[in-house]
Amino acid sequence: MASLVKEDHFEESHKYMGFALHQAKLALEALEVPAGCVITEDGKVIASGRNRRNETRNATRHAEMEAIDELVGPWRKDGLSPSQVAERFSKCVLYVTCEPCIICASALSFLGIKEVYYGCANDKFGGCGSVLSLHLVSSDISEKTQRGKGYKCRGGIMADEAVSLFKCFYEQGNPNAPKPHRPVVQR
């Protein structure tokens, strides 16, 4: 029975990561860093996001923040209190193509997300183990500095596919970079 559960979970995580990869491809087509995500609740996708930093000229518009905003706005409009919003997030699972950065990992902790599954590691800015482990709650932290609830986190889901999108983006050059390091390849 245990192996069946693991196999079902494997299939489920790949299914939702496939949806997140689709969002990342949309980001790539828009000349954004190709990161994408989906948020699920009770086995249904309830939000999605992709990087929109260049499009919005806002450095905080990471895929995770886009998906979070897709939920928080309507929930608050529906009259949910902050504690009810937190209750909803405690039942949600995020699938994202790249390990959440420090900002996003911290936001997910404050929101009380249940679980995060990611594709490739984020060796420069990762907040779920690569640089910091913001998904963990330490018993050493005082109540005043508590940074949120911990959440389960697992990486490496379809990582090769996620890395391939990043390679494609960086090989073509970033036309939105202030000083491109290499010439932009025209498509």
Image (tube, rainbow, N blue to C red):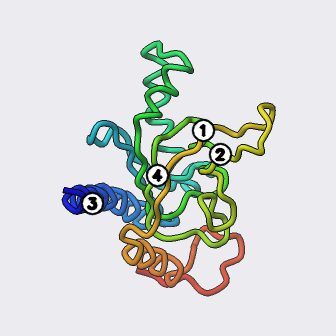
Q: Secondary structure at mark 2?
A: loop
Local crowd at mark 2 within 10 Å, few (<14), some, or many (≥20)?
Answer: some
Residues at discs 4 and 1 in contact (Cβ within 8 Å): no
- Which one is earlier in the sequence, the residue at label 2 or at label 1? 2
For discs 1 and 3, the disc positioned in front in the rendered view: 3
Q: Amino acid at mark 1?
A: Lys
Q: Say which quadrant the C terminus sits in.
A: bottom left
Q: Is residue 78 above or below residue 27?
A: above
Residues at discs 2 and 1 in contact (Cβ within 8 Å): yes
Whole-number angstrom distance, CA of label 2 to CA of label 3: 26 Å
Local crowd at mark 4 within 10 Å, few (<14), some, or many (≥20)?
Answer: many
Residue marked by disc 4: 116
Q: Is residue 52 above or below residue 29?
A: above
Residue marked by disc 1: 149
Whole-number angstrom distance, CA of label 1 to CA of label 3: 25 Å
Residue marked by disc 2: 137
Whole-number angstrom distance, CA of label 2 to CA of label 1: 6 Å
Q: Nearer the viewer, residue 62 or 83?
A: 83
Residue 21 falls in which quadrant of the image?
Answer: bottom left
Q: Secondary structure at mark 4?
A: strand
Whole-number angstrom distance, CA of label 4 to CA of label 2: 15 Å
Residue marked by disc 3: 6
Q: Amino acid at mark 4?
A: Val
101 to the left or right of 20: right
Q: Residue 76 placed where, x, y %?
A: 49, 20
- Which one is earlier in the sequence, the residue at label 4 or at label 1? 4
